[in-house]
Image (cartoon, rainbow, N blue to C red):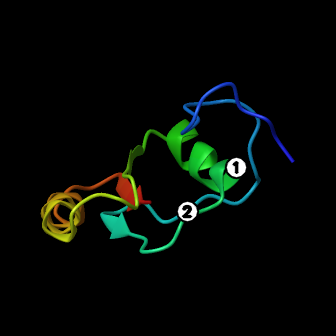
Amino acid sequence: DVDYPMTPPVGGDHNPSWLNCDGDVYEKAVPDVSAVHSLEHGAVWVTYSTKAADADVAELAERVRSTPFTLMSP
């Protein structure tokens, strides 16, 4: 287990497995340690509050899906 000084984390120790990050949109929270590994490879991780309006999440997801080296999760 890794404790990060901020949420979401932006770097640090991570899992040897990374997440797909070619415009992938995850509907459930992903493990921080895997997302941080994706960041190490240059990915951009878009996170959002589960309280966000569905329309806002859908608009964000549309942009992420069309952008290489990105992933999105709550």
User: In the orientation shown, which residue stands out farthest toward the bottom?
Assistant: 27
Question: What residue is at 16 percent from the left and 63 percent from the top?
Answer: 66
Given the image, on which type of amino acid does mark 2 rest? Leu
Of the pair 8 and 21, the residue shown nearer to us: 8
Note whether 72 is above or below 26 in the view shown. above
Q: Which residue is mark 2?
A: 19
Given the image, on which type of amino acid does mark 1 rest? Val
C-alpha gap between disc 2 and disc 1: 10 Å
The crowding category of the residue bearing disc 1, from other C-alpha atoms within 10 Å (few below 14, some 14 to 19, many at least 20), is: many
Question: What residue is at 60 percent from the left and 43 percent from the top?
Answer: 36
Note whether 10 is above or below 21 in the view shown. above
Question: What residue is at 18 percent from the left and 69 percent from the top?
Answer: 58
Q: Which residue is mark 1?
A: 33
Note whether 71 is above or below 43 in the view shown. below
Q: Quadrant of residue 12?
A: top right
Comparing labels 2 and 1, the label whose residue is closer to the camera:
1
Question: What residue is at 28 percent from the left and 58 percent from the top?
Answer: 52
- Per the image, label 2 sits on a secondary structure element best described as loop
What is the x, y in percent for residue 60? 19, 58
Position of residue 37 in the picture relative to residue 38 (left or right)? right
Position of residue 68 in the picture relative to residue 6 (left or right)? left
What is the x, y in percent for residue 34? 65, 55
Total numbered labels placed on residues in the image: 2
Of the pair 36 and 2, the residue shown nearer to us: 2
Mark 2 vs mark 1: which is more N-terminal? 2
- Per the image, label 1 sits on a secondary structure element best described as helix
Position of residue 53 in the picture relative to residue 35 (left or right)? left
- Please identify the quadrant where the C terminus is shown: bottom left
